[in-house]
Amino acid sequence: MPELDLPYVDEHAVDVSEPRDVVWNAVEQYAHGLGFGRHNPIAMVLGTEPRGGFRVTESVSGERLALEGRHHFSRYRLVFELGPTTAGSIRLTAKTYAEFPGLRGRTYRALVIGSHGHAVLTSGMVRSIARRATKLAAEQGG
């Protein structure tokens, strides 16, 4: 799927005090496990493409990983970026871009974005990746 030109929705970030390669590994592990199972009833009702909900469309090692997908009510892009902080840790940011065409799309947006459910889930994603990075660093003896 080519890069989608979509409106910005929001971003969520956390500082991670682990080496960049460890944080990147955590991002990749998380991203490749993200989404619905192939036979998940929610994915079937939404008509997600790909069936799991996301596919990797861009990967710049240690810097940026983009996922894209679509379903009946939306086209979306989730971008994880790793940047520096003034404290020397890694700033992990998840940026969301999406469009919600038509009346059903606007209704879906109100349910998902307007309810703040998306913000809670995306903020949870970056915190989960940070915890995974900490666990990976401990396993590596760092």
Image: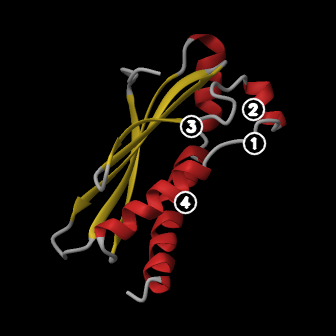
Q: Earlier in the sequence, mark 3 or mark 4?
A: 3
Q: Which residue is mark 4?
A: 124
The answer to whether mark 2 and mark 1 are in CB contact below 8 A is yes
The kind of secondary structure element at disc 1 is: loop
Considering every residue shown, the one lying at the far bottom of the view is 141
Q: Which residue is mark 3?
A: 114
Which residue is painted at 79% across and 27% down in the image?
44
The kind of secondary structure element at disc 4 is: helix
- For badge 3, the amino acid type reads Gly
Q: Is residue 101 above or below residue 70?
A: above
Question: Residue 90 in the image: x percent, y percent?
Answer: 28, 67
Question: Residue 15 in the image: x percent, y percent?
Answer: 33, 69
- For badge 4, the amino acid type reads Gly
| Nearer to the camera, 75 or 40 | 40
Considering every residue shown, the one lying at the far front of the view is 140
Q: Earlier in the sequence, mark 2 or mark 4?
A: 2
Which residue is painted at 75% across and 42% down in the image?
37
Q: Earlier in the sequence, mark 3 or mark 2?
A: 2
- For badge 2, the amino acid type reads Ala
- How far apart are the alpha carbons under marks 3 and 4? 17 Å
Which residue is painted at 46% across and 85% down in the image?
138
